Amino acid sequence: GKTTTLKSVMGITPPNQGSIRFRGELLAGKTSNLIARMGIGYVPEHRAIFRDLTVEESLRLAERRKGDLARRGELIFDLFPDLQRLRKLKGGQLSGGQQQMLSIARALVPDNRLLLIDEPSEGLAPVLIEQMMAAIRQLRDHLTVLLVEQNFTMASQLGDHYFIIDDGKNRHSGLMADLVQNKALIRRYLGVAETGLE
């Protein structure tokens, strides 16, 4: 239900019940492109980059208005300096970590207010997870991030609030600081032993 939740926000998978509002406006019935224009960026689980486009072409393609990349380039390349160095390489030539950086950077080209990021640590080496965490931590100074992440260590260090979704239902929610102290809840839903929280 976690990925489905993000897709529902973006209008890709309409919700079966309930409603989704962004800045007071109902999203139901709006197409994905209209939702994106409202200021919501989406970083899908499997990156979905264009393998035959260069890094620069992919970023330019993400512009909503001419000059978006020029306006946002400093932020993007401060967060992901590797991408500036690799601007002329095609997406298919990038490592998995670099592809993940590109996927997030692409969602930062427009001036979004909300960024939905689905499983950014999946398949990444620990050193790259640390880089991703540092970038997302900095991003929180610029916009709101809704992070779907099964890596509890990463999620607990980045999140202010949490929602535990199990079998398509929201089982628990609250402040991340409270969840970190609730070892029984962590073991029950996240499969993390107490020693794994050190």
Image: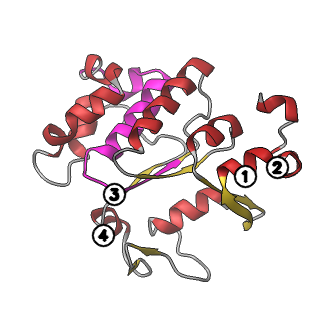
Residue 12 can be seen in this image: no
Element type at mark 4:
helix
Q: Is residue 135 left or right of residue 169?
A: left
Give me the disc on residue 193.
none
Alpha carbon of mark 3 to alpha carbon of mark 2: how far?
31 Å
Residue 176's spot in the image, x, y percent?
66, 50
- Which is more N-terminal, label 4 or label 3? 4
Please name which of the two marks, 3 or 2, marks the residue nearer to the observer. 2
Mark 3 closeness class: few <14, some 14–19, many ≥20 residues within 10 Å: some
> Callout 2 environment at 10 Å: few (<14), some (14 to 19), or many (20+)?
few
| Residue 94, image x, y percentages | 41, 22
Residue mark closest to the camera, 1 vs 3: 1
Q: Tell me the quadrant of the picture where the C terminus can be found.
A: top right
Q: Amino acid at mark 3?
A: Arg
Compared to residue 136, the image places residue 87 above or below, namely: above
Residue matched to label 2: 182
Res 178 label: 1
Which residue has dot 3 on it? 113
**Residue at x-position 49% and y-position 24%:** 131
Whether tag 2 and tag 4 are in contact, CB under 8 A, the answer is no
Mark 1: amino acid = Asp
Sequence order check, earlier mark of 3 and 2: 3
**Position in image of residue 58 (x %, y %):** 28, 37
Report the front residue among 141 and 30: 141
Residue flagged by tag 4: what amino acid is it?
A: Leu
Extent of the magenta region: 88-117
Callouts 3 and 2 close, C-beta under 8 Å: no
Give the number of the mark in front: 2 or 4: 2
- Ranked by sequence position, the earlier of labels 4 and 1 is 4
* Residue 129, magenta (yes or no): no
- For numbered disc 1, what is the local secondary structure? helix
Disc number placed over residue 34 in the picture, else none? 4
